[in-house]
Amino acid sequence: MEPPQGLEAILPDVVELTKALIAAPSITPAHGSVFDVLEAALRPLGFTVDRFVAGEAPDGPVENLLAVRNAGPGPHFAFAGHLDVVPPGEGWTSGAFEPEVRGELLYGRGAVDMKGSIAAFAAAVGALPASGTLSLIITGDEEGPATYGTLALMDRMAAAGLTPDMCLVGEPTSAHRLGDTIKIGRRGSTVIDIEVPGRQGHVAYPHLADNPIPRLVRALAEIDAIELDEGTDWFQPSNIETIDLTVGNPATNVIPGKASARLSIRFNDQHRGQDLIERIERIVHAHAPAGIVRGRVYGEAFLTEPGTLSTLISDAIEVETGIRPELSTSGGTSDARFLSRICPVVEFGLLNATMHKLDEAVALDDLHKLTAIYETLLRRVYA
């Protein structure tokens, strides 16, 4: 495939590559031109690029990219990330997909989440001699259902006999200063829908109806009283939140025929998602035997115990920034929840202050520093 016009001249400059990626609109699920840009950046660096589309509606199709550079004996280090972005929304100072430098900042959707870190990794690799095996695991659907993204890439890798020794996910983990935080784990996430059926009727004749609301409220009260755990050395306490309660009854004289609720549970590594769904189901059925409970596990909790990988990354950060990062498991989910099944995985990237916001922006200096950190890390991995 021919690179987009003029791209050869900008590589491996991290700022220009970030601009080129931002300029390729890629609202989730991403496909097409943004992958063209990345592929054109990676091929001159010695990578074999495998692009493929996986899945069908409603969660697909999804485009993914697996790039591998095999340079003989040595560790297999993987970098994972996503090219898709959330919708930009209205009210940007300049176009969301029209990268613009104002002062010391580069603006554009995906600047920090996470096209900037993908560009930084490519630029870091461009400064290194080929050694060992390097792979980039890049999906077009991390911000969406993630059904046919990283999971499909993992299947592709397994079919090719590729198993990384360690993996870095370039999510924006830094909170106040580049390098202050890396993520060594994440809590799990499950969403549970509850529906309690009743029998509609006139409020003046309650004996001829069956109001589902009291049963649902009693079930929710018992659920709300649950203390799942007190947290662990690395995780905060798990929590159950009622995020929706719906009856949908516009009348003032009608007992409704059903009542519904939705729960969101964020849980640490003392729990499994399916176990939590079954626990909620038991409570609901104790109050409403005909109640319907539907749960979906979006990710299990995982922890990469502090060790070789987190030390390598922390050392590289300290060399380039002078600070020692905090090891954290805070925040939402990421595709590291999948990759943790096959190898140790840690997340580290840019500042997260503007991700998903209007006028998302990255400091130009942070792009260069992140490139330097990734380069130092890789030199130590392949030393």
Image: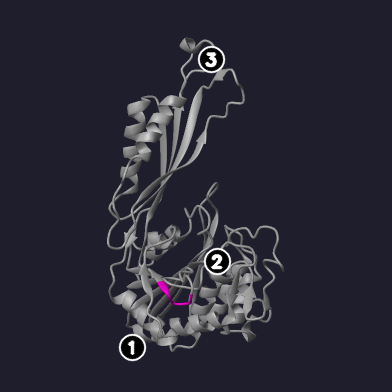
Above or below — where is 367 with respect to 63? below
Residue carrying label 1: 383
How dense is the environment of label 3, judged by Cα within 10 Å: few (below 14), some, or many (20 and up)? some
Q: Earlier in the sequence, mark 3 or mark 1?
A: 3
Q: Position of residue 235 (x, y in %)?
A: 32, 59
Disc ID at residue 75: none
Residue located at (47% from left, 35% from top): 261
Disc ID at residue 83: 2
Task: Tell me the distance, in whole angstroms, between the alpha carbons under discs 1 and 2.
Answer: 30 Å
How dense is the environment of label 2, judged by Cα within 10 Å: few (below 14), some, or many (20 and up)? many
Left or right: residue 272 versus residue 298 is left
Left or right: residue 32 versus residue 273 is right
- Helix, strand, or loop for circle 1? loop
Disc ID at residue 201: 3
Of 45 and 144, the residue lying toward us: 144
Of 369 and 143, the residue lying toward us: 369
Which one is in front in this view, the residue at disc 3 or the one at disc 2?
3
What is the three-letter code of the residue carrying label 1? Ala
Q: Quadrant of the N terminus?
A: bottom right
Decide if residue 249 is in sight here: yes
Task: Tell me the distance, in whole angstroms, between the alpha carbons under discs 3 and 2.
Answer: 52 Å
How dense is the environment of label 1, judged by Cα within 10 Å: few (below 14), some, or many (20 and up)? few
Q: Quadrant of the C terminus?
A: bottom left
Q: Earlier in the sequence, mark 3 or mark 2?
A: 2
Left or right: residue 280 versus residue 99 is left
Q: Position of residue 147 (x, y in %)?
A: 47, 53
Which segment is the magenta one? 177-181
Q: Position of residue 181 (x, y in %)?
A: 41, 72
Residue located at (62% from left, 84% from top): 10
Q: Quadrant of residue 217?
A: top left
